[in-house]
Image (tube, rainbow, N blue to C red):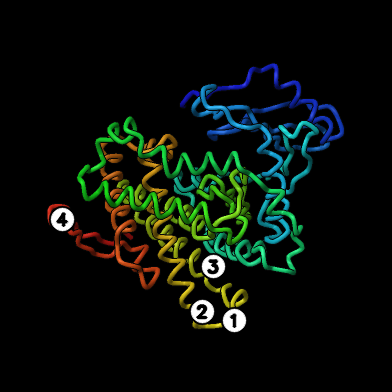
Amino acid sequence: MEKLARVADDQEPEVMSFGRAVLGGRVHSLEEVSHGNINRIFIARAEAGEVVIKMAVPFVRKLGLSSPLTVGRLQSEALALQVHSLVAPGLLPQLLSLDPTKTMMAIEYLRGHSDWREQLGAGIYVAGVGSTLGLYLAQIMRKTRPDYPRSGVPVDVAATLGNIAMRSFSENVIFVAPFSKKIWTSRPSLKTSQDVERIAFALAERTRWLFTTRRDCLLHGDLHTGAVLVNPLSSSIKVIDLEFANYGPVSFDIGVILAHLKIAQIRAHVLGDRKGMVYLDQQAQDLWHGFLRALPDIFESPAWIERLTEQLLQETSWFAAMELFRRTHGVFPVSDLETLPAQHKRDAEERIFDTWLSWADAPSPRTFDDYWGVVPMTLKDPALSTQFRKIA
C-alpha cells in the first residue's frame, strides 16, 4: 500500500477527546481507516456506540508537507453536508458535531457499508446505485439553485460556503496540473501529436471556464465511486466526502461519476468480467435517465427541457473526458487502474485514451447512447483515425 504523509500521533489524543465528547463516555478504541488523499479518518468506539471522525490535516496527505491546505475546509464541508442532507434526505450520513477548532467533525458510522469502488473491484454488484445517484443529482440541481425558493436552504448559503481554497485546489489539480511538463512526458501511454495536444488544451480551457464561471447549484465537487458507500445486504446507498463542495455546473458532478463508471467498466473489460461490464453499463444508463426524469419537476417547458438535455449531455461529455485525462495523467490516479497487472493496465489505458479522445472531440451527442457507447468518429488527422466501439 502506498505510504501517505501523516500527522504526528500526538494528534490522536485530540481525536479521542472529541470522540468522548460526541459519544458521551470513554472511548475504548480508536481505529484509523484513512485511505483518501486529503484527510485522516478514524472510527471511535465507546459503550454508547461508534462514530466516524474526520480530521483535516494542514497539507495534502498524498503529496506531503510541501503541499499545504487550509484546515478550515471542514467548516465548508459540514455546511454542504447539512444542505445536501436537507435537499436529498436519507442519502447522506448525519453530521453529529463539528469541534470548536473546526478541524474535526463527527459523522454517523454507517455499519455494513463500504465504498462502491472497492465493491466493484471485488465483483460485488448491487442494484439501484445508479438510479439513486441520478435522483441525488437531480435534487441538488433542483433545490440548491440560487433561485429556488422552497428548499429551506439558508439564503446566504452561497456567501457562507465560500470554499475558495478547495475550489482553487480543484481547479489546479483538474485543469492545470495534468498539463505540467513533468507529468505530460512521464506517461508513455499518451499518444503525443499536435492534434491530440490541441484537443487536450482546448478541452481544459473549455471545461475550466464552465467550472469557474457557472453557479447552477451546490455541487458535491468530487463525486467518484469512492465517495459512494453501499450496503450490499440492505442496498442502502450514501454519498460522503463533500470537502470540495462548491457552486458550479451540475454537468461537472455528472461527468465525474460517469467517467469513473467508464474506468470501472474498462477495468472489467480487460479482466474479462462480462457481468461487471453489463452491470456498469446499466448503472450509467440508470443514473442519466434517473436524473432526466426529474427535469419536468424543475422546468415546465418540454422544448426547454429538450434543449437543456442536449446542453447537459455535451457538457457532461466534456467534464467526463477531463476527469479521464486527469486520472491518467495527473497526480491522483485511481486504484481501478493502479491495481491491474502491467499488461492489463496498458490495455486499459489505451481504451481510456480512445474514450477520452471521443468524448473530448466528438460532435455533440444527441442521445446518451451516442455518448456512453463511444460512437465511431474520424479525426482530421487520418493517422489518428480510430474506430471506437461500445465495450459493453
* Disc on the earlier residue, 4 or 1: 1
User: Which circle marks residue 177 in the picture?
Assistant: none
Residue type highlighted by circle 1: Glu
User: Residue at (34%, 56%) from the top-left corner?
Assistant: 274
**Residue positioned 40% across, 43% down in the render:** 326
Check disc 3 and give the amino acid type. Phe
**Callouts 2 and 1 close, C-beta under 8 Å:** yes
Task: Mark 1: give few (<14), some (14-19) or many (20+) Cα within 10 Å.
Answer: few
Badge 2 amino acid: Trp
Question: In the image, is 135 to the left or to the right of 322?
Answer: right
Q: Position of residue 105 (x, y in %)?
A: 73, 37
The circle on residue 304 is 2
Q: Position of residue 56 (x, y in %)?
A: 65, 32
Mark 3 vs mark 2: give the one in front: 2
Identify residue for label 4: 381
Q: Nearer the viewer, mark 4 or mark 3?
A: 4
Farthest residue toward the right? 24
Mark nearer the N terminus (3 vs 2): 3
For the residues marked 4 and 1, what is the alpha-carbon distance in whole angstroms? Answer: 44 Å
Indicate the secondary structure of the residue bearing disc 2.
helix
What residue did someone put label 1 on? 300
Q: Is residue 252 left or right of residue 144?
A: left
Q: Residue at x 78, y 34 (%)?
A: 99
Viewer-closest of 292 and 316:
316
> Is residue 291 something one can see in this rendering?
yes
* Residue 216 image offset from top left, x and y in percent: 58, 61
Give the residue number, with chain letter if any, for mark 3. Answer: 291
Q: Quadrant of residue 136?
A: bottom right
Q: CA distance from mark 4 to mark 3?
A: 36 Å
152 lies above or below 69 = below
Mark 4 surroundings: few (<14), some (14-19) or many (≥20) residues within 10 A: few
Answer whether labels 3 and 1 touch (C-beta < 8 Å): no
